Each structure stands twice: as C-alpha cells, then as structure tokens.
Image (cartoon, coloured by chain):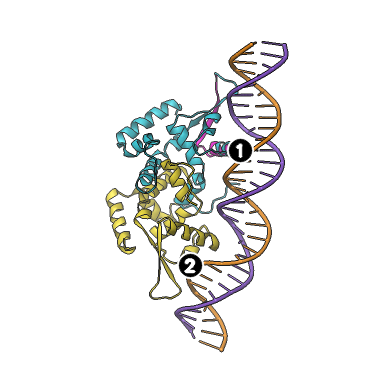
Chain colours: A yellow, B cyan, C purple, D orange
Amino acid sequence: MEKHRSFCPLNLIVEAIGDKWSLLILRDIMFENKRHFRQLLQSEEKIASNILTDRLNTMEREGLLTKQPDPDHKQKVIYSLTQKSLDLMPLMIEAIRWSLKYEPVDKVKHKPAVDLGNSSSEDQELLAKRLKQMHGI
Amino acid sequence: MEKHRSFCPLNLIVEAIGDKWSLLILRDIMFENKRHFRQLLQSEEKIASNILTDRLNTMEREGLLTKQPDPDHKQKVIYSLTQKSLDLMPLMIEAIRWSLKYEPVDKVKHKPAVDLGNSSSEDQELLAKRLKQMHGI
DNA sequence: GATCAATAATTGCAAAATGCAACTAGTTTT
DNA sequence: AAAACTAGTTGCATTTTGCAATTATTGATC
C-alpha cells in the first residue's frame, strides 16, 4: 500500500498534498472556518462530492484531519485540523506571497489571504494559537 | 485556454505547480544543478520522458523556465530558472521543513535538502545569489 | 565517410485520477 | 407527514499520467 517514489522531502510533501484539491480543503478549514462536509462542498472552486469524500478520508488516514460526530446534529461530522496540518501554515503563507507577486490574485475578494501574506510572524503565531483552541489541539 | 477555477492565491499556485512533477523538476534544476533533458530524466522518481517534455514546455509557457540551445552541443538544450521560479525557494524550504518533521525523509541520501531546511536566511540569500548568476537572471 | 551513441523529444496504448449528475439512507425542520 | 438537509455513493465520461518503443538530428569514433 504505502509506497513512495523516493524519500526526498520535497517528493514526500508532493505525494502528501500535491494534488489539485487537498490544499484548498485545508485552506477552507483553516481560514474559512468550515467544519462540515456541506460547507466544504461550497468552495469557490466547486469540488465534486466524490472527490471531497476521497480527500477527506485520505487526509484523515494521513493524519492531516480528524473526524468527529457533531453532538448537536447526529448526521453531521466535524472535521478538525491536526498539528500536522496546522504546521502547513508557513508553507501556505509563502505560497500566498508568491501568488501575490506573480499570479492574478483577486485582492478584493481574497483580502483575508492577502492580509495573511503580509502578516507578521507574531500575528501568525496568534492565529495558530487560536486555531489550536478551535480544533482542540 | 487560460481559465482559472478561482483567483484565490492558494488556488492559483496549486494550478501553477500543484501537480506530481513540476516541483521535482524545479528541485533538480535548482538544487542538483541539472540543466539538460537527459539529466532531468534521471531523477530518482523516474519521470517519463513525455511527462518531462510536457512539464518543461508548460513551465516555459508559464515563465517558470527558459530554454536556450547549448553552444557547446548543438543537440542539447539548457534549461534555466527565472526569477519567478527562483522565488519559489522560500516555499520549497518550508516544504522541506515540514517533511523533515512529519515524513520519513532519508536524511542521509538527502543531506543537502536537510541542510537547506536548517539553513539561515543569510545562507539562503547566498544560494539565491549564486543561482541567479548561474542562470543568468 | 560510415557507424554508433546521445540528444530532445514523439507516439500509441494502458491505467489512474478527476469531473459531473443523479441518487441514497438517515435526520432535522416545518 | 412532508419537505429539506446531512454525508456520502454510484455510474459513466473525460483528462491526466505511466510505460515502452520509436524518431530525427547531432556528435563522436573508427
């Protein structure tokens, strides 16, 4: 099952989150406070529900997410970040910075991301702390 | 042709380099000093030649690489970094750090990458400068 | 100058990943 | 009881990737 093309750090992260959707799902959980399947389904990029299911399960298996039943709603599942996925924040911030420099980012619609790209490391620490509380890490 | 799923910075970078190979090709050019097709073909991960061709062309179109004929070797092509791809270095370093923390990196075989992950920002600046010279940026 | 090896690809076909629309079984709301 | 909502599942079409063989051109060797 578990087979790696190589044990190069860059390859390993590509294998882990280098598909077209995983990082966007984590973005929505991390920065948009989405915690339910239905919310994640409503991303701007319009992920298909079967892909979403697959990615959520894969990322759970990889330790990037945890699932728990919603106590207020028997049919809802709450998705939470782990330390492992939270630790992708620095990478995501570098990604945002790069895109801001080179890609046609909609800076109005995505002002929170822009702000994050420009935030100090203290602000990032603060956000990380807040997320850790919210996600019970 | 040019159609984006959204103009979110994270989505745009995923669209640009979020496939299974682009980042590894850039890694080989950036950190392994590979400059020719044949060298890139010999990556540890065993990329197929048609995929390599496709990614090189795509990345050239995206401004992540430039091609030039090798003056010493009429049938060789030299691939060079651009400022745009060089500016992915901070992201790659964060990626390396994350993998070192969470993935089964072979730290012996990939010592240069490990060292890069642990390097100071001064060392990174120095490397960037050296690469800029080598690639004529 | 004929042969052989190396170069950057290209081609054809198989396999895997993704996309899309409809559907499901159970749950909550009205 | 009916309607709407929940996290998925299913089936099928399209796209991307993987693999092996092949190609046209150039350079090096004999």
Asked if residue B61 is among those painted magenta in the image, a careful observer would answer yes
Q: Looking at the rendered structure, which numbered label has been put on residue B133?
A: none
Q: Which residues are magenta?
A: B57-71
The amino acid type of the residue labelled 1 equals Asn
Number of other residues with Cα within 10 Å of mark 2, as a class: few under 14, some 14 to 19, many 20 or more:
few
Asked if residue B59 is among those painted magenta in the image, a careful observer would answer yes
Q: Looking at the rendered structure, which numbered label has been put on residue A38?
A: 2
**Picture coordinates of residue A78, whole percent (x, y):** 41, 67
Say whether marks 2 and 1 touch (CB < 8 Å). no
Residue drawn 34% across the image and 63% down it: A135
Res A25 → quadrant: bottom left
**Mark 2 chain:** A
**Picture coordinates of residue C20, whole percent (x, y):** 61, 61
Q: Is B100 on the left or on the right of A57, as rendered? A: left
The amino acid type of the residue labelled 2 equals Arg
Front residue (pair A59, B74): A59
Front residue (pair A39, B30): B30
Query: How far is disc 2 from disc 1 in space, using C-alphas?
Result: 39 Å
Front residue (pair B65, D29): D29
A82 in relation to B75, above or below: below
Q: Looking at the rendered structure, which numbered label has been put on residue B50?
A: 1
**Tag 1, which secondary structure?**
helix
Q: Is B92 on the left or on the right of A52, as rendered? A: left
Q: Nearer the viewer, mark 2 or mark 1?
A: 1
**Tag 2, which secondary structure?**
helix
**Picture coordinates of residue B55, whole percent (x, y):** 56, 39
Q: Which of the image's four quarters has the C terminus of chain A?
A: bottom left
D5 in relation to A122, above or below: below
The answer to whether residue B54 is visible is: yes
